[in-house]
Image: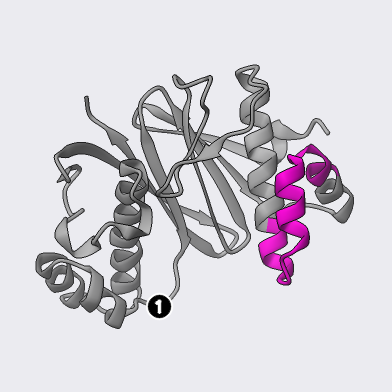
């Protein structure tokens, strides 16, 4: 299929490129063509999923990875590090990360190690914030109400996810040990630049954060 320019939106966040795909806009025929572009391993994984939304997310993510491999003429499939971070073994100069939320799938890529997270904005979860946020983050969140509080929650949460994924540790990293209120984050003896952007699309608000390793 050749609709990348119309169905995949491209953005620049810091030194990385982001491709965003809205799965709601796709026909069943287009999803089938995307499915055919996915690796055998991803197709097998997708077939085991019971949720239709999760299957669409998996296909969307697989298609974006297919486009990335096409762009850089990469023939290998990525492998997952112990923390879950996907990497190319033979094309180590191409760094990327994948995320999906609701009807969206995204891939970020660049020349330095990175992590990326996207989240559709819902209500703020203060129980999660109390458990995983640093005190200054929780206090910042508590000062807000309603839509502003939800907006702040997902801005912080996607930032934490992005840093954890950039580090390679994933969800095993203690989120309450580092703050993402600032743009430059010091965490586990590494430094990251955090680039964030909020999107409004068809009534849905989406936060996207990309954490890039500063060398």
Whether 144 is among the magenta residues is no
- Judging from the image, the colouring scheme is one colour
Q: Position of residue 88 (x, y in %)?
A: 52, 28
Is residue 24 something that shows in the picture? no
For the N terminus, the quadrant is: top right
Instruction: Tell me which residue sits at (21%, 68%) in the image.
Output: 133
Q: Position of residue 95 (x, y in %)?
A: 45, 29
Q: Which residues are magenta?
A: 33-56
Instruction: Tell me which residue sits at (34%, 72%) in the image.
Output: 150
Is residue 153 something that shows in the picture? yes
Q: Tell me if 35 is positioned left or right of 54 in this view.
A: right
Q: Nearer the viewer, residue 121 or 118?
A: 118
Residue at label 1?
Answer: 123
Q: Residues within 10 Å of mark 1 (few under 14, many from 20)?
A: some
Quarter of the image where one finds residue 13: top left
Q: State the predominant SS element of the stretch in magenta.
A: helix
Judged from the image, the secondary structure of the residue bearing numbered disc 1 is loop
Instruction: Tell me which residue sits at (40%, 22%) in the image.
Output: 111
């Amino acid at each position: 299929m050749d609709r990348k320019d119309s169905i995949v939106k491209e953005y620049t966040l810091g030194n990385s490129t982001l491709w965003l795909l809205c799965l709601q806009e796709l026909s069943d025929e287009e999803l089938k063509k995307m499915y055919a572009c996915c690796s055998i391993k991803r197709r097998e994984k997708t077939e085991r999923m019971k949720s239709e939304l999760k299957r669409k997310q998996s296909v969307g993510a697989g298609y974006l990875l297919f486009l990335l491999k096409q762009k850089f003429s990469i023939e290998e499939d990525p492998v997952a590090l112990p923390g879950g971070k996907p990497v190319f073994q033979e094309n180590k100069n191409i760094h990327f990360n994948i995320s999906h939320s609701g009807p969206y799938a995204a891939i970020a890529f660049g020349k330095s190690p990175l992590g990326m997270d996207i989240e559709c904005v819902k209500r703020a979860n203060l129980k999660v914030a109390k458990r995983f946020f640093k005190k200054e983050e929780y206090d910042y969140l508590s000062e807000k109400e309603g839509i502003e509080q939800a907006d702040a929650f997902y801005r912080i949460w996607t930032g934490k996810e992005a840093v954890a994924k950039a580090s390679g540790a994933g969800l095993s990293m203690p989120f309450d040990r580092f703050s993402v209120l600032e743009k430059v984050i010091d965490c586990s003896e590494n430094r990251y630049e955090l680039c964030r952007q909020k999107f409004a699309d068809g009534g849905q608000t989406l936060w996207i954060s990309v954490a890039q390793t500063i060398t």
